[in-house]
Amino acid sequence: MVKRQKIRKAVIPAAGFGTRFLPQTKAMPKEMLPVVDKPVVQYVVEELVDAGIRDIIMVTGYHKRTIEDHFDEPNLDLIENLKMGGEKKRPLLEAVERISEMANFVYVRQKGPYGNGTPLLNVRHIVGNEPFIYTWSDDFIVAEPSRFKQLIAAYEEFGCSALASIKATRDEDYDRYGFAGGKEIRDGLIDVTTVIEKPGKASAPSDLANVSGFLFTPAIFGFLDKALENLKEGDELYYNDALKLMLAGGHRVLAVEIKDGNEIKDGKYYDTGNKLEYMKTVVEFAMRHPDINGAFREYLKGLKL
């Protein structure tokens, strides 16, 4: 296998207002909504770190200081309070101290046109001429190996950009996600020739929905520049526009179906970006949480609605 440039950096856009969760997100960023006892963005960061990422660049807005505080060192008052709790509080002390030590965190304020392509342009000077991961702050896929490890494995084998994908299971999925089409290299791996946003089931080029994370080569930046030049007044800048230009320019892109473990089944996709899916995520994670799973399951069984 050809030795590839190591994937060291990840970019997480986190500048949105989270309007679907108002009024809760008036003061709390949506990325900090808790899934049991951890904010959703921490699940994403932990998965990145487990995949070998050491530099995490978050593109934020003026109202996202809470995210920076969360990944900063804990304040002295909290540390002293936990130390006073003795051995009982030691696991909590270690947990909060570990957060700031997971990675190098860099924060950039978003500026430019609306759209999910703009955060990439904002961090080009930090990413440099390196491949990197671009992933959202409010969704993830539970799989083993993780989605990021699977994307990195595809990059190491083929040396090109890769899109995390899951198989659509509902008709409404085709009106919600982008879909990739092209030649199947092997089961769950497509050499992409086209990407269509929300095509509807009848027009979808495959059943692989592109969700939750991407691995881009630095070539994406030049095509973002071209997409920006083509932008009409009032339009948003989407990474997908640059992706289509990459494909048209002969750059290879893969769609990688994220699978889980030896059973070779689909990874479980969690989207906390809307209220219903967020609540489903919280319930499922609570049912697996080692501290409360038994009692919580019994509570659910006893509900009479």
Image (cartoon, helix red, strand yellow):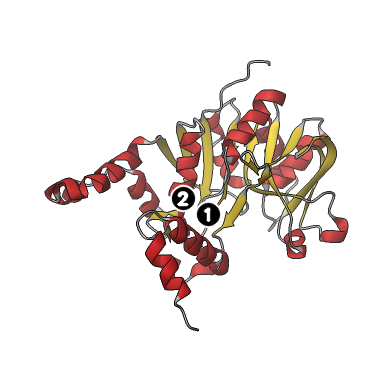
Q: Position of residue 187 (x, y in %)?
A: 78, 38
In the image, residue 274 above or below residue 154: below
Left or right of 163? Residue 31 is left
Left or right of 195? Residue 23 is left
Label 2 secondary element: helix
Which amino acid does the dot numbered 2 rest on?
Answer: Val
Left or right of 292? Residue 217 is right
In the image, residue 19 above or below residue 206: below
Residue picked out by circle 2: 41
Residue drawn at point x = 58 percent, y = 34 percent: 149
Crowding near pointer 1: few (<14 within 10 Å), some, many (20+)? many
Residue farthest left in this picture:
84
In the image, residue 206 above or below residue 98: below
Which amino acid does the dot numbered 1 rest on?
Answer: Asp
Q: Position of residue 79 (x, y in %)?
A: 19, 46
Q: Kindly indicate the quadrant of the structure image that contains residue 292.
A: bottom left
Asked if residue 229 can be seen in this view, the reply is: no
Q: Position of residue 62 (x, y in %)?
A: 42, 54
Crowding near pointer 2: few (<14 within 10 Å), some, many (20+)? many
Q: Nearer the viewer, residue 253 or 122?
A: 253
Q: Nearer the viewer, residue 245 or 9?
A: 9
Q: Position of residue 9 (x, y in %)?
A: 52, 32
Residue drawn at point x = 49 percent, y = 46 percent: 44
Q: CA distance from mark 1 to mark 2?
A: 6 Å
**Quarter that holds the N terminus:** top right
Label 1 secondary element: loop
Residue picked out by circle 1: 138
CB within 8 Å, label 1 to label 2: yes
